Image (spheres, rainbow, N blue to C red):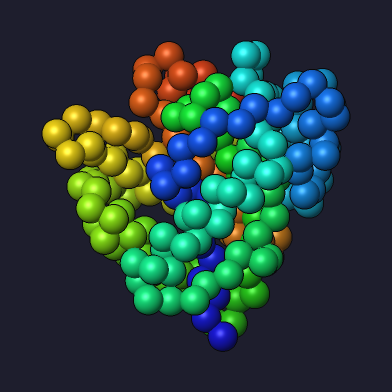
Amino acid sequence: KNNLNMKIHILTVFALIISISCKSDPNKEIDEGKITENVYNNSEIGWTIEIPKGWNVTKREELQKRNNKGLKAVNDANGIDYDANDLKQLIGFQKDRLHVFGATTEKFELEYDGEYEENKKMVKEILYKTYVENGLKVDTISKKEKIDNLEFDLFQITVYNPKGGVMLYQDLYCRYINGLDFGVNLNYINDNEKEELMNVWKNSKFN
């Protein structure tokens, strides 16, 4: 069995369709956890994050559209047949189609030491190839970063348009927590929205 935990929602560059949730109960748009006022809490991984003012919880149908489009792009570019059936949508919110936050979990049963690290490396290679096969120039950086004293693996992608200008920045965080592959994706292009995203993510809490 190949534990190919993709975090398919990160490929929103292939599905830049804006869809903002209405003012109905935002808890209907998520698979796990609970939103109370503007705070999301997930007891399974012990995580709490505030949804910034002016940002809206992303509709479930929009998340599914992105996942499907991203999944097809990944499979077509790499000649694989990965499905995202075990992917759980935690919280997604956005200001517009280019400024997006998304968090997911996926079960990941470790079968040997170092398997999770191997998987992360493979996913990075697959993502890079997906962009290149779709005619996009990208730069990538891998590093570690702490959020509330937990160390995350950070994979940063800069996507360029055909004229060489920056089309999108993506910061992809992942960490193994309680038998789950926990992933967070931040998409942005403008400094103000980047600061808003970084503030709420870096001020989020784990217990």
Q: Based on the displayed image, in which of its 4 quarters is residue 24 positioned?
A: top right
Position above or below: 40 against 4: above
Say left or right for 78 vs 136.
right
Q: Nearer the viewer, residue 22 or 182?
A: 22
Residue at x-position 22% and y-position 37%: 161
Residue 15 visible in the picture = yes
- 117 left or right of 150 in image: left
Q: Quadrant of the N terminus?
A: bottom right
Is residue 78 or residue 203 the one in the foreground?
Answer: 78
Residue furthest out toward the bottom? 1
Residue 58 in picture, x, y percent from top left: 65, 34
Residue furthest to the left = 163
Viewer-proximal residue, 191 or 23? 23
Relative horizontal placement of residue 138, taking residue 56 as reference (left or right)? left
Quadrant where the C terminus sits is top right
Task: Tell me where residue 52 sits by quadrant.
Answer: top right
Q: From where the camera sits, is residue 128 visible?
A: no
Q: Which residue is pictured at 85% across the width and 29% down the height?
A: 25
Q: Residue at x 77, y 49 (%)?
A: 31
Q: How many numbered tags mark residues here?
A: 0
Percent across and percent down for residue 51 are 67, 24
Query: Residue at (32%, 44%) from the top-left corner?
Result: 157
Residue 28 image position (x, y, % from top left): 82, 39
- The answer to whether 175 is drawn above or below residue 4 in the figure is above
Find residue 5 and report its horizontal and vertical position in percent: 54, 66
